[in-house]
Image (cartoon, grey):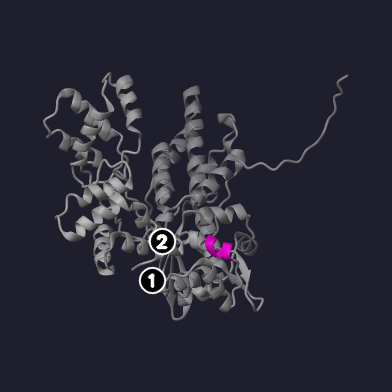
Amino acid sequence: MLKQQLSQKLLQKLSPQQIQLMKLIQLPTLSLEQKIKEELEENPALEEGVDENERIEDEHDTYDEGDAQTIEAEDINVDEYLSDDEVPEYRLRANNYSTDDEDAQIPISGGSSFTEILYDQVGLLRLSDEDKTIADYLIGNIDDDGYVRRELSAIVDDLAFTQNVFVEIDHLENILKLIQDLDPPGVGARDLKECLLLQLKRKENNSGIRLAIEILDKHFEEFIKKHYNRLLERLEIDEDYLKEAIAEISRLNPKPGNSSGQSQKVIQSVIPDYTITINEGELELSLNSRNVPELNVSKEYKEMLETYKASQDKNKAQKDAVMFVKQKLDGAKWFIDAIRQRQQTLLITMSSIMNFQKEYFLSGDQLKIKPMILKDIAEEVRMDISTISRVASNKYVQTPYGTFLIKQFFSESMKNDAGEDVSTREIKKILEDSIADEDKKKPLTDDKLAQLLKDKGYPIARRTIAKYREQLNVPVARLRKQL
């Protein structure tokens, strides 16, 4: 038998406006500019550009969630949108641009893509219509690095099903060889070995090139594993001769697709969201002016409300119009306020991070970066950890020592021999310096690196050294070996 009962639950839910604010906080500068552009296009009550002599006070109005509810036109207090006493005009805009700001943009060339360059070269070959179709299809299977990574048997099947072209694998390989003769050298290779050999065979035939071809063709495994002693023994050559061949190989391009001036990849410029400068020994933080553009509420929409207020005969069309105007005005007011709240949140959070890492920002010494996690900053600024994470996400800060991703300053802590908490960034820096200063003929193994750091007062296990080394994109000792 079913029983019915009443129960009360207390739930905390974010309003749509709060969710939108969180999304705005997470956006980097370039994405924010695009978002503002979209909002200006969608909301005619929002305009760009204000009187440059007017200034913004620090206080700001809070968006009233009740304004978003559905109400009747007669219930609208038009004076709320017309009275300068209720909502001063300077509170309805955000202004952080200077007349001296430059709208610098990186020019991006709009020439032919890498694939189009290959198509143009194939068009110059004397091929039958069927072979031209096969060649074009093969080019379509070349990735951005310049490789054909699919099995030729799979391409044969695709040609039959999609192009109604039936071809044998031997003939497909012959067409592929024609493509491999195109520029850039090495394009159309199926693996790294074939790519390097294709490039070497186009070079001048001398003793160093011949030896390099022999090494790649017959001793490729020993070469990539840097077993130089085995190569010296099997090839019966001296070390200088081997160095000459390795130098020839090192000058080759392992990714010929990226050698084209017209890459398919998008150029993404980094625009810092903050700037930290040092003035008379003190740190100064500023927010990129493009984070808070000039926005204001449309005066034309205010005039529409004035017309409605002065009208004696309020028909249905006028009521529908005033509902539309109110909705757009509410949206414009909230968006301006959200942008300003974003500015305030970003400044408060980054100011806390700057003060926490003050020693580093004054000196630039990475060894002075303190252990810092999101919780440390959240507790100091009295915000949620998720908000701090959004502020630090995909944001950059320009310092006297370079431009860095903000999340790089967050790191866990470990204890040294003296029992002091040190940042894992500090340990990675020492590890990186130790590898840079090692003897390249006898590079340090992970065990030796662990012992080296232990001698410096950092008791770290070998597996931790291996983890940090991988995070620094440093290969194992064997692959760092040089002649």
| Secondary-structure class at tag 1 | loop
Q: Which residues are magenta?
A: 462-467
Q: Is residue 154 left or right of residue 210?
A: right
* Amino acid type for the residue under numbered disc 1: Lys
Q: Position of residue 74 (x, y in %)?
A: 57, 30
Q: Position of residue 172 (x, y in %)?
A: 25, 30
Residue that numbered label 2 is attached to: 479
The residue depicted at 46 percent of the width and 56 percent of the height is 395
Q: Is residue 388 left or right of residue 11?
A: left
Q: Is residue 458 above or below residue 308?
A: below
Task: Mark 1: give few (<14), some (14-19) or many (20+) Cα within 10 Å.
Answer: few
Q: Is residue 22 visible?
A: yes
Outermost residue to the bottom: 280
Q: Main secondary structure of the magenta part?
A: helix
Considering the image in quadrants, where does the N terminus appear? Answer: top right
Viewer-nearest residue: 422 or 361: 422
Please say if the residues under marks 2 and 1 sit with CB atoms less than 8 Å apart: no
Q: Is residue 279 above or below residue 241?
A: below
Task: Mark 2: give few (<14), some (14-19) or many (20+) Cα within 10 Å.
Answer: some
Viewer-nearest residue: 418 or 245: 245
Q: Is residue 466 magenta?
A: yes
**Within the image, what quadrant is residue 465 found in?**
bottom right
**Within the image, what quadrant is residue 64 found in?**
top right
Compare marks 2 and 1 and give the one earlier in the sequence.
1
Q: Position of residue 2 (x, y in %)?
A: 86, 21
* Amino acid type for the residue under numbered disc 2: Leu
| Secondary-structure class at tag 2 | helix
Query: Which label sits on residue 441?
Result: 1
Q: Is residue 294 left or right of residue 10?
A: left
